Image: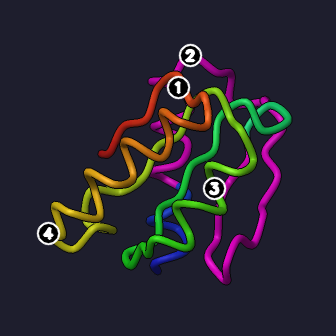
Amino acid sequence: SPEAEQEAILYELLLKSGFELTTAIEQLSIEGKKVYSIADGELLICLEKQLTQEVIKAIAAHKPTRVICLDAGFQDNDQLKTNAVQLMKSKGVVNFRTV
């Protein structure tokens, strides 16, 4: 199921980011998209397949230290991706990456 698939990716990213599997994970709804908040919002992970400027803005507004999004979420829209990178930087996100 897509749910199980998302969860598998989520836990893999958690470990790769240096978090324990026991780390508190909160599920947020940001602009109608599912976003996982790790360790009280230090890291936000969005595994949605359709990202928009609004979603990116709303995620950045939470001022996390790190953000991970699915590369597929940008649907080959380089402009959106470039904007996302700049937006994250302007909000003080230290590390923004796509997987």
**Is residue 93 left or right of 64 when viewed as pictured?**
left
Give the mark nearer the N terminus: 4 vs 1.
Answer: 1
Read off the magenta span: 8-37
Q: Would you name the residue on which mark 2 appears?
A: 18
Q: Would you name the residue on which mark 1 appears?
A: 15
Disc 4 from disc 1: Cα separation = 27 Å
Give the residue at x 63% y 55%: 59
- Which x, y percent locates residue 12? 46, 38
**Is residue 52 left or right of 7 when viewed as pictured?**
left
Residue 37 higher or lower than 40, as above or below: below
| Colouring method of the image | rainbow
Q: Secondary structure at mark 2?
A: loop
- Which x, y percent locates residue 32? 67, 83
Q: Secondary structure at mark 3?
A: helix
- Which x, y percent locates residue 65? 64, 27
Give the mark nearer the N terminus: 1 vs 3.
Answer: 1
Contact between labelled residues 2 and 1, with CB atoms less than 8 Å apart: yes
User: In this orientation, which residue lies closer to the viewer: 20 or 83?
Assistant: 83
CA neighbours of label 4 inside 10 A, class few (<14), some (14 to 19), many (20+): few
Q: Would you name the residue on which mark 3 appears?
A: 59
Disc 3 from disc 4: Cα separation = 20 Å
Give the mark nearer the N terminus: 3 vs 2.
Answer: 2
Give the residue at x 85% y 35%: 40
Check disc 3 and give the amino acid type: Ile
Contact between labelled residues 2 and 3, with CB atoms less than 8 Å apart: no
Tell me which corner region of the image, top left, top right, bottom left or bottom right, holds residue 72. Answer: bottom left
User: In this orientation, which residue lies closer to the viewer: 52 or 36?
Assistant: 52
- Which x, y percent locates residue 84? 39, 52
Q: Secondary structure at mark 4?
A: loop
CA neighbours of label 1 inside 10 A, class few (<14), some (14 to 19), many (20+): few
